[in-house]
Image (cartoon, coloured by chain):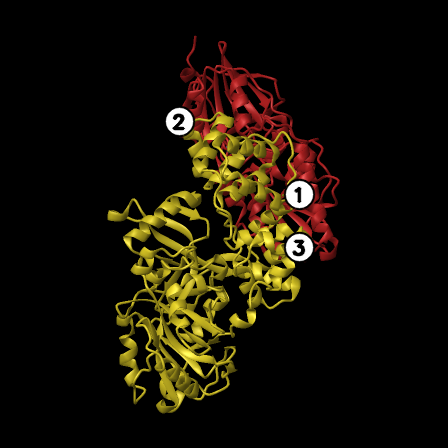
Chain colours: A yellow, B red
Amino acid sequence: MKQFSDLISTIEITNKTNAKIDALVNYFDTAPDKDKLWLIALFTGKRPSRPVKTSLMKEWCMEITNLPEWLFLESYSSVGDLGETMALLLPNNSSHLDLSLSEWMTELKALKPKSDDEKKAFVLEAWSGLGQQERLIFNKLIGGSFRIGVSKKTLVNALAKLTGIDANQLMHSIIGHWDIDSITFEELIHGQHINYDNSKPYPFCLAYALEKELPDLGEPKDWFVEQKWDGIRGQIVKRNDEVYIWSRGEELVTQQFPELVEAMSNFNDDFVIDGEILAIKDSAVLLFNDLQKRLNRKNVTKKLLEEVPIGFYAYDILEFNGEDIREKPFAERRQVLELLFGLMALPSHVKLSHLVNFKKWEDLYRIRANSRTINSEGLMLKQKASPYHTGRKKGDWWKWKVDPLTIDAVMIYAQKGSGRRSSKYTDYTFAVKKDDALVTIAKAYSGLTDQEITEISKWVNKNAIEKFGPVRTVKPELIFEIAFEGIALSNRHKSGVALRFPRISRWRRDKPVDEIDTIESVKQLITAS
Amino acid sequence: MLKDNQLIKFTKKGIYCPKGKFYLDPWYPVDYAIISHGHADHARWGMKHYLCTDDSKAILKHRLGEAINIQSIPYRQSISINGVNVSFYPAGHVIGSAQIRLEYKGYVVVFTGDYKTQPDFITTPFDSVKCHTFITESTFGLPIYHWKSEKNLQSELHDWVRTNQSNNRTSVFFGYSLGKAQRLLSLLDGADDIFVHRSIYNLNDAITGSGIDLPKSKLWSADLDKNSLQNKIIIAPPSLLGSKMLKRLPNPATAICSGWMQIRGNRRWQSVDAGFAVSDHADWNGLISAVKASEAERVYVTHGSQAVFSKYLNEIGIEAYELKTEYGDEALAKAEKETEIIERE
Ligand SMILES: [Zn+2]
Ligand SMILES: [Zn+2]
């Protein structure tokens, strides 16, 4: 397991995505076939269920180390991770076990039905035969909580770099159904278990923030205007009776939204449509916070399906019955979309994105101002003649947000509040990326619910790295969207920019730290605002 | 028999011996200060008179100024100050570091300052001293801290340097200029040419000037040809992390060396390529063995995990108390940074 353990060490310490990719490429280049498959399985959440209870492992660890429980717990609160705490507390290994990752995984799978005594004998033997870092990995393999800062995207990019296979296809391959015992690495990455032709998405067409006055756009009659819904941009691909849903992050999220798959399966035609995945209840769009409850879940429970039903607002159609129609003008594509949706009696949660009715540009100010009341973020302006561009191209599509100024930043310091909230951490300092480091960008203390504050306070208690009087330095792991009124260059700020009235607009539990804003992307907002 | 509170008092300015009229590592200016070692949270400015070990003298003068009024004695030799016998015993922490032993009418108090029980290649090894009252540090006073042997650390560091060289990278180690820097020098000696930052270079100069041998190193200065550093080894204080000087290096691989690096969460997000748990302090077993070897009837626990460690000592039958001081990691980090800025000038 040395090789796997070394890979984890390398990935963990670096925050440079390229270094992570290189380490993964090197692993895929040299590790045995079965180990590679296990690595992919572990990193994509396909792991066997936990064979040994945490409480038992804790008990055995205390027994071996002869430590009182309070001291075990003190150690745990200082380390912040149970598997790691045990790895550090246990005495040095007396022997050396040399099993590969896949051999360990096979043993762990076989352990599940055994008696507690047999499990104990197995775990104790492993503990005394593994060095500290390998012991930590072993504990993590048992626990199944393998969070080490590698997104599926990074994993896929490494595989793409190694094999030259298209990243979207690889994403589909590793996420699709496969059984580790009946597939080889080559078969997996070449997607022999999937039909990529059926799921293949198109690159999304993206809009720029509006940077001119409305009249400068020309005639109102040349434009379609829609609400800018605050959900997750998604592409629904339906081909040959199969339905796939891709997120803008190029992740296949089909399994997360069974109600969309069901609705789309009812269509007779094949298509690729672009739209917004939203939480919709009783025909009203819910807040993004509600939608988040449905994201990145392994299992969608019945209760959750009822609490937060998912819907889809269709914006555009890119392919119709096998024909790529992205080059056709938007007005024509919109007609195809209307036709498609008109053919079916659709369930209420799947809708065409409504076109805003307006004659003069001035009409839009009032409509935009009301966006928030229907949980929309503002307006989208699309030129009727525009093709569906690949990526971002200036001029044809504009987003005109109510709150145009937001960034995604990571919390780096937390401080307790005063008065009613003096027991909770309510004041936070946020940072964005600058090269490979972080730079402070704003301080903000409003915008979260009491429940979120309680949760964050607990997290801060567990994850403080350093104290400076009342201020706690925390591990940079929690991402927030920060909204503000204005932005300007500033010499007084280390980041080089000053934000006016920053506030927390929401907690982005769905974002990995890798994807926070950079100081460059923040500075771009200066011209946009 | 005397009680310890007649020999030492814990005051606002530091640990005080009323009989001897002197302080141990005080944090405010006093007339007479006995200094355990040269770290900035233990050896502070402004004392009218300093007493330290022979090996610490040059370090203190270098850091606090040539003009200080300072006296030194060798390890294990005692002098009498107002009737109190004072002597130094090696603490194994940094060059010149000592435990301070006080004896008055047969009653013995030992103040450890900072210490490390595991031997290394450069500091005089820790020597345990029997006493009635033992005042111990507890920086790493949790059972999660177990250090590797010096030999294992050495091969780990050499392996890392070799890997970097095979990738055409220069290995940069970060550690405090006093203690960690010399320890790293001794660990890395023989791996390749070693360059050190000016603050370390000047301090090393002062140390060798007082007759203590150190492994060879060269000055890492801004005007050096970049290519002469390629694939070599650099040792720099932590304040250089993220500095312009570091950015000028063509392809650096960076590592922080500190006991805190034992924990994964501390290794991540430091914007470095590696973290090595190289500590100048005692680990959990080291602390316990030192306390037991002292055979003290009473233990005071200072900077670090004093609450946890003193609670545990009481549970295993050793009378122990927490003691609040102004030593410790945060104070050290702040004070060392200030010292390094001055040393650089
Ligand atoms: Zn020290
Ligand atoms: Zn200290």
Q: Which numbered marker is on residue B201?
A: 1
Q: Nearer the viewer, mark 3 or mark 1?
A: 3
Q: Position of residue B204 (x, y in %)?
A: 66, 38
Q: Nearer the viewer, residue B186 or B110?
A: B186
Q: Nearer the viewer, residue B103 or B266?
A: B266
Q: Is there a contact, CB below 8 Å, between mark 3 and mark 1?
A: no
Q: Position of residue B219 (x, y in %)?
A: 69, 47
Residue B43 seen: no
> For numbered disc 3, what is the local secondary structure?
helix
Which quadrant, please, contains the N terminus of chain A? top right
Q: Is residue A325 above or below residue B204?
A: below
> For numbered disc 1, what is the local secondary structure?
helix
Same subunit under labels 3 and 1? no
Q: Is residue A146 above or below residue B18?
A: below
Classify mark 1: residues with Cα within 10 Å, few (<14), some (14-19) or many (20+). many
The residue that disc 3 covers is A26
Of the two numbered discs 1 and 2 on the same chain, state the one appearing first in sequence.
Answer: 2
Left or right: A334 in relation to A11: left
Amino acid carrying label 1: it is: Tyr
The chain that hosts pointer 2 is B
Q: Mark 3 and ligand 1: say if the CB distance to the nearest ligand atom is below 8 Å.
A: no
Where residue B298 sits, quadrant-wise, is top left
Residue A91 seen: yes
Q: Position of residue A186 (x, y in %)?
A: 65, 60
Q: CA distance from mark 2 to mark 3?
A: 59 Å
Q: Which numbered marker is on residue B264?
A: none
The residue that disc 2 covers is B11
Q: Is residue A39 above or below residue A50?
A: below
The chain that hosts pointer 1 is B
Q: Position of residue B146 (x, y in %)?
A: 56, 32
Q: CA distance from mark 1 to mark 2?
A: 37 Å
